[in-house]
Image: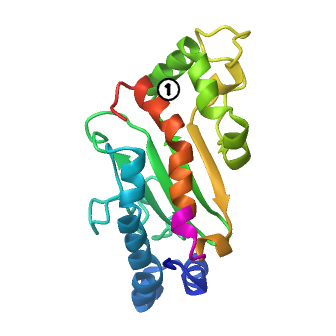
């Protein structure tokens, strides 16, 4: 078993949140590489066989540019927050056709006190939202099988930061899954405490998560005419 992250990983990210400027980051970039970026890239490599057992159409890509790992640099052009760096590190295990069509992803997030694993569609375009909602409306039984099993709900939470107050247009208010259709993001996630992220059993736990999230991802791929 491998250990990827450590107290040093969280210490760096907490310090980055406090000293979020280019001079500080330049002076401590070696710590970022040693304790955050390189361990995350190793984890992405090690997850490849686990992901392949779930689907051959998703990628855990450890390339340093254009792979699964998001850049630590923020795009602050259209934000009031002009801090140049994200005080977390994230990675998506993406569908091979993500550049051609909208597609769901698995996602891993490293942040002191805020790490998590999840999967689904985050901030989909309105047309994609509509397709998924219509698919759930037309196929409610398989949605319930994928997302409402007791074991699944004990492990994962339906992300609810952006939910309509009324039923989406065109769907009856008495539909049995109308509360699910109100969601703008179709994401389920599980928080991981710092000890869990630093555990030698992290990869094993994430492999279990990927397998458990597979029915959700299979369903979303079917809704969007994607291979799973």
Q: Residue at x 37, y 35 (%)?
A: 228
- Quarter assignment of residue 18: bottom right
Q: Is residue 176 left or right of residue 138?
A: right
202 part of magenta stretch: yes
- What percent of the width, then of the height, locates residue 108? 51, 59
Asked if one can make out residue 77 in the rendered structure from this viewpoint, the answer is no
Q: Is residue 205 left or right of residue 64?
A: right
What's the magenta region? 199-204
Residue beneath label 1, please? 129
Q: Is residue 179 above or below residue 73?
A: above
Q: Nearer the viewer, residue 6 or 46?
A: 46
- What percent of the width, then of the height, locates residue 198? 59, 77
67 part of magenta stretch: no
Q: Residue at x 48, y 29 (%)?
A: 219
- Quarter assignment of residue 204: bottom right
Q: Nearer the viewer, residue 112 or 143?
A: 143
The number of numbered discs placed on residues in the rendered structure image is: 1
- What percent of the width, then of the height, locates residue 102? 36, 34
Q: Residues within 10 Å of mark 1 (few under 14, many from 20)?
A: some
Q: Tell me, what colour scheme is on the image?
A: rainbow
- What percent of the width, then of the height, locates residue 197? 59, 71
Q: Residue at x 61, y 85 (%)?
A: 7
Q: Is residue 143 above or below residue 64?
A: above
Q: Is residue 223 above or below residue 97?
A: above
Q: Is residue 200 above or below residue 80?
A: below
Q: In what element is the residue under mark 1?
A: helix
Asked if one can make out residue 62 in the rendered structure from this viewpoint, the answer is yes
């Amino acid at each position: 078993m491998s250990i990827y992250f450590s107290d040093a990983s969280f210490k760096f990210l907490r310090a980055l949140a406090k000293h979020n400027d280019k001079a500080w980051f330049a002076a401590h970039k070696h710590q970022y590489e040693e304790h955050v970026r390189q361990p995350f890239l190793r984890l992405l490599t090690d997850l490849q066989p686990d992901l392949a057992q779930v689907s051959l159409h998703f990628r855990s890509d450890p390339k340093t540019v254009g792979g699964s790992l998001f850049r630590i640099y923020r795009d602050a052009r259209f934000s009031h927050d002009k801090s140049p760096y994200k005080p977390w590190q994230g990675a998506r295990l993406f569908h091979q056709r993500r550049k051609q069509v909208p597609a769901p992803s698995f996602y891993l997030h490293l942040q002191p006190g805020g790490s998590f694993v999840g999967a689904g569609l985050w901030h989909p375009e309105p047309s994609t939202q509509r397709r998924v909602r219509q698919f759930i409306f037309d196929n409610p039984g398989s949605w319930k099988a994928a997302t409402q099993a007791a074991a699944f709900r004990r492990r994962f939470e339906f992300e609810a930061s952006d939910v309509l107050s009324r039923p989406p247009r065109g769907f009856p208010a008495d539909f049995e899954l109308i509360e699910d259709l109100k969601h703008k993001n179709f994401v389920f996630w599980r928080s991981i405490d710092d000890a869990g992220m630093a555990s030698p059993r992290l990869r094993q736990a994430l492999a279990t998560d990927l397998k458990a999230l597979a029915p959700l991802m299979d369903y979303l791929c079917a809704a969007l005419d994607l291979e799973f």
